[in-house]
Amino acid sequence: MLSERQDTILKMIIEDYIKTAHPVGSKSICEILNCSSATVRNEMASLEEIGYLEKPHTSSGRVPSEKGYRYYVDNLMEPKKMTGEDVLKLQTIFHNQSLGLNDVILKSIEIISELTNYASIVLGNSTSVNRLKRVEVVPVDASNLIALVITDTGHVEHKNINIAENMDIEEIRKMVDLINNLLIGTPIDEINQKLEFEIKPIIGKYIKQHEAIYNVFYNAFNDFTIKNDVYFAGRNNILNQPEFDNVSKIKNIVNKLEDKELIHSIEEDDSGINIYIGKDSKIDEDVTIVKTKYVIDGEAHTMAIIGPKRMEYDRVVGILEYIKKNIER
């Protein structure tokens, strides 16, 4: 373990570097700690020697190493309390009664990306284990209905759907009967394919407004599938960070983020907040992934934030903890 003074200096260097992306010199630390620059330089040299700091060739300052970030995350960092403004943005989603849970989750990660300027991602369990048992629709008013999708494992998903004024509810019920007659037992992630190739060619014989009604159901099932697949928000945010100004590095990161198998491998871990720094991220040595599992109806899903190694860890962990608590509630 480090001394108390080394802890303080390492924490200051990391938090300063996270803000500025510039190597940190001894002068700014001396002013805050009110001690001699020789003392601070000696401590910085010791921290470099044991691998917590690195010295870029072009500068007299130091930057955190991967080992330094890991020590900071495990020993020095405390999750940051969210600002009232951030809480308000998320609460408008959590309190919106017209949104289904899936929409709440997807809108949450869009807001995370907006707040942090990092990429956000949701991973669900594979839908191939869930097969369709039944679809039902419940009219709410003239322009809204709720579609319920029930699977053979007893899982129920609901989706609020806006319908055009001229859409006949009886025609919609015919579509539901068609799906229930032809698609029962189909894995959820194959339903859209079957809608496209088995129901679309024959739907005109049974349903007058077939094109509009087909699109309503196709889009609804697409949303259900997203929940169990990979959904990104702010994917390009990560490339706006100063670390990623190298074309081959950007290309490598973009390719990795397109690799669904690699992204799915993020989720194999315990619950709680997990932080994969640099090489542990499996994406790039300058990338960090912070992730958490949340459980809904007994099924575990993963939410993650992907950003530079020079990430605002305390803020990201605070936001993820807050969202996990609200979604599970």
Image (cartoon, rainbow, N blue to C red):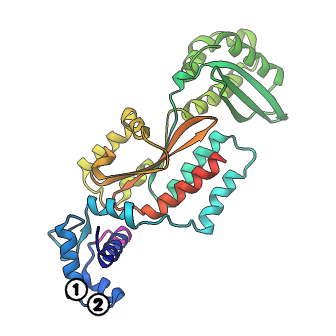
> What residue did someone put label 2 on?
35
Q: Which of 206/221 is in front?
A: 221
Residue 145 percent coordinates (x, y): 78, 33
**Over which residues does the magenta segment extend?**
18-22
Q: Which of 222/126 is in front?
A: 126
Residue type at tag 2: Cys
> What residue did someone put label 1 on?
39
Q: Are marks 2 and 1 in contact (CB under 8 Å)?
A: yes
Main SS of the magenta segment?
Answer: helix
Residue 244 percent coordinates (x, y): 30, 56
How many angstroms separate mark 2 from mark 1 (CA)? 7 Å
Label number found at residue 203: none
Q: Choose top left, top right, bottom left or bottom right for residue 26.
A: bottom left
Is residue 20 one of those drawn in magenta? yes
Name the residue rendered at 80%, 36% in the picture: 143
Residue 79 percent coordinates (x, y): 49, 64
Residue type at tag 1: Thr
Q: Choose top left, top right, bottom left or bottom right for residue 118.
A: bottom left
Residue 284 vs 310, above or below: the answer is above
Name the residue rendered at 62%, 30% in the picture: 219
- Horizontal side of 73 relative to 233 (left or right) equals left
Query: The residue tagged with tag 1: helix, strand or loop?
Result: helix
Name the residue rendered at 62%, 62% in the picture: 87
Residue 226 percent coordinates (x, y): 55, 34
Residue furthest to the left in view is: 57
For the N terminus, which image quadrant?
bottom left
Query: The residue tagged with tag 2: helix, strand or loop?
Result: loop
Mark 1 crowdedness (10 Å alpha carbons): few <14, some 14-19, many ≥20? few
